[in-house]
Amino acid sequence: MDGITIRFTVNGIAWELTSDGRRRLVDVLREDLGLTGTKVGCNAGDCGACTVRLDGDQVCACLVPIGQVDGRAVTTVEGLAGADGTLAPLQAAFLACGGAQCGACTPGMLMAADDLLARHPSSSRGQVLDGLGGVLCRCTGYTKIVEAVMASGEAASEARIGSAAGSSVSGSRAPETASAPAGSAVGARIARLDGVPKVTGAEIFADDLPDTSALTLRVVRSPLTHATFSVGDLDAFTTAHPGVVRVLVAADVPGANRYGIYETGKDQPVLADGYVRFAGEAALALVGDAHVIAAIRDEELPIAWTPLPPVLGISAGLDPDAAQLHEDRPGNVLIEGRVARGDVDAALARSAATTTGTFETTFVEHAYIEPEAGMARVVDGRVEVWATTQTPYMDRDELALILGLPRDRVRVIPSACGGGFGGKLDLSIQPLLAIGAMVTGRPVRGVYSRPESMRATTKRHPSRITATFGADLDGRLTGVRFHGDFDTGAYASWGPTVAHRVPVHATGPYAVEAALCTSRAVHTNAPPSGAFRGFGVPQAAIAHEALLDDLAAALGIDRLEIRRRNALRVGSVTATGHELQASAGLSACLDALAPYWASLMVDARAFNSRAVATGTPIRRGIGIGAMWYGIGNTSLPNPSAVEMGIEPDGTVRLFSGAADIGQGSATVIAQIAADALGVAVSTLARTAPDTDLTPDAGKTSASRQTFVSGNAAKLAGEALRRQVLALAEAGAEARIEPTPDGRIVVRDGDATSVIELRELPVGARGCVLLASGTYDPKTTILDESGQGVPYETYGFGAQVALVDVDTEIGTVVVRRIVAAHDVGRAINPTLVEGQVEGGIAQGLGLALMEAYVPGRTDNLHDYLIPTVGDAPTIEVILVEDAEPSGPYGAKGVGEPALVPTAPAILGAIRDATGARITCVPATPDRVLGAIAAAGG
């Protein structure tokens, strides 16, 4: 197979190359032809990101040897658009419908859909689900993708009809990004501003960076859960393997060989120094020729392992006889959290009804479609790092400590981020790339394999929660006692955040007289648990929503009604003593759901009557879950800065360091800024995040960017508007119209003035006018009892789930979810809906199928995430209870969207069968066990 000649066409262009016929088609497309639109998510045919069409049929390019392509035709995502840039109707539909979020799966989705529509131009929903079933998406929840494909099919059908009637339809351009006139961008369904590269394959992710001179990084990781190790003769090893330029060990770390989120929690080594605490921890790193280092077998590596007894699970971590994994953390307890208000014992004692339950969750993997990747180089004594990240400035500061450099000698340039959900808040590949570049003097690039990504990166915290809830005869909560232990794994990561956030949210979004809520983060020899869409709140919600259902049953109160009676409202005081001043829209969400709740209840009861009559084992149930979520950091500074300027040619430029990981912040912040300045979004140009070029907008997490960076953008836009109006000597209501010939026309009533921009001196960031805005939410430090104001505002929401349970085999199918979320103000309704739909899909995975088991589910074949066929019908209701402190009333929704989904599904299973699920995921065996325990 070596050196055979292969002739084939790609997107209509003929190619001839000599290659090893066993090479993967995806590698030839990306490395030889430069067609990086085809993405690599797993290299195992599991995710479908690399889907292309081969002689018209969709295939995974990672599974096709190039030798099988001889004489055949390949079509990639780059071949869909016209030569003049005209988008295919399918691509335009993805933009218009919001079918692309992070963009990592989008090329594969488009090619699968292109194949489907070629065979079934007017596809039914069932055909669309079948046609897209081989491609995974972790962001969208699939709803808008399905809508886009069906809309494209309908458009194509109309085009054929029009052509038959004598008209001609040649294609479609992307939806106008400035369809909203000046001053009306907020609230408009503007197409994603960064959407065109996502649907054309032009988006550059970290593994797409073209630099053929770069060396390649391969990390050597511990195969053992707990071990010591020794390193052999490195000189002999490199001599025996020409092409290995350097083997990096702990001693090569030039600065601090420790990193972590908190100043007091920097406990994770870049490279372990003879001792590892989890399987997958980095011990060595090879830097050299890609083919050489990939071919080295594990047994050739100069490293010897000595196993130690592992500490696995919360109980083992807390065992007094367990090994102490960190000397400064007695009992393996990283940190504790506490919120205490009122006399809980007395409140529970006088309750008309009480209920207690213990609930467990397991590790959950982020499973973003883009694995960790990046490249580093040294330029004029400075280290530059390109990488997929949610937090460029935190990366820069951490790298400076690791590299022993001042911050101004480190530059971080985020690539497009193919999904994050919290998993790309921690450092991963970045420090090893940077060290490799420093010690070799050459660029170094690397990408994690899918198994490596899953072994080495953070997970959602497993939890064991025991709680007691009490209520009076009217169903109003009297007292809550809650304790949660969380497996924080080998290192601290975001364990302190989870331990502090959970007690604040443990009562649920309800008013309660007294509460004692505590938590612990416990070290074990598991992979580090970090941030994952909710910081522990989804786990707590499973407990508090199940117990509220218990109280409703005990007191004979409808499950929606008991939530309405207890809902936090304006004027309510939370368990931390925070009196809510504005925007607490849970009651409005429940009111919006009430008609659906009633009709779906009737549907479920009628279905079950028929099932009993016919002897069918399927039972249908309905469940409800409610939530609240504090926006931003818990009782910590949370600032964001945004700058906005006008360049000499009239371009209005937005400088924001907010990483858009698919949620749409690049578009939302621009909409806010445009309205604040009073111009159309089309006049804005965006400088993408870059620690040299953009101010620090903080991390993309905790559902904070719309609220915090949005506020900063609004302040920047308003400040820039004042500058322009002052130059024109115009009033506050004047209209501002930048022109492409270097002017600003200002119309103030009947008066018109013109500002000649090229006559103004150019200042900072190349602008003639520049303004900045900074915003930091108003919070207070919580005292020893957890009393204070942990967040300036909260998101609220509730969801209703309709499920079918097969009582013979234990399978659960979610048929429908109706979600009502208080978002304050929907800056871009399409993007907000997409966040809710994506959160629901992840909540479904948490409830029913996702369980990461180290060493067993290190791939997307054994680790199950929802496919398009698992996605239920979703209806999103946006409740706009304006937050006065938010930009135009907006709050965040990224994490709130996930929190109530699992509780609603678990409640629906219980409604259908009587089975109380206390350990998720609710796999068939657990469902059958719970049915049996309930006497079913």
Image: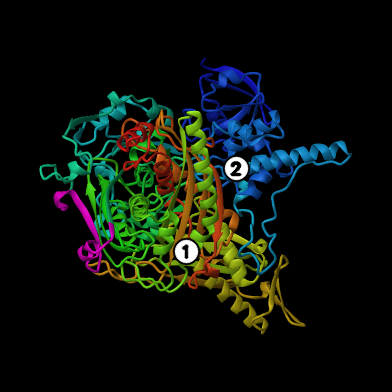
Give the CA separation, mark 2 to mark 1: 31 Å
How many residues crowd mark 1 within 10 Å: few (<14), some (14–19), many (20+)?
A: many
- Left or right, 58 with reference to 477: right
How many residues crowd mark 2 within 10 Å: few (<14), some (14–19), many (20+)?
A: many
Instruction: Give the camera-side residue of 914 and 488.
Output: 914
Decide which of tag 2 and tag 1 comes sooner along the chain.
Answer: 2
Identify the disc placed on residue 145. 2
Name the outermost residue toward the front.
613
Residue 581 visible within the image: yes
Dot 1 amino acid type:
Ser
Name the residue tied to disc 1: 587
Instruction: Give the camera-side residue of 119 and 676.
Output: 119
Could you say where residue 295 lies in the image, as x and y percent from the top left?
38, 25
* Residue 592 position by quadrant: bottom right
Residue 140 visible within the image: no
Q: Which residues are magenta?
A: 327-353
Could you say where residue 411 lies in the image, as x and y percent from the top left?
43, 55
Q: Quadrant of the C terminus?
A: top left
Identify the disc placed on residue 917. none
Confirm or deny contact between disc 2 and disc 1 (CB under 8 A): no
Residue 337 part of the magenta segment = yes
Q: Considering only vertical position in the picture, is 486 above or below 221?
A: below
Task: Tell me the mark number nearer the camera, choosing from 2 and 1.
Answer: 1
Name the outermost residue toward the right.
166
Dot 2 amino acid type:
Ile
Could you say where residue 414 lies in the image, as x and y percent from the top left?
47, 51
Name the outermost residue toward the top.
1
Could you say where residue 621 lies in the image, as x and y percent from the top left?
46, 42
Number of marks in the image?
2
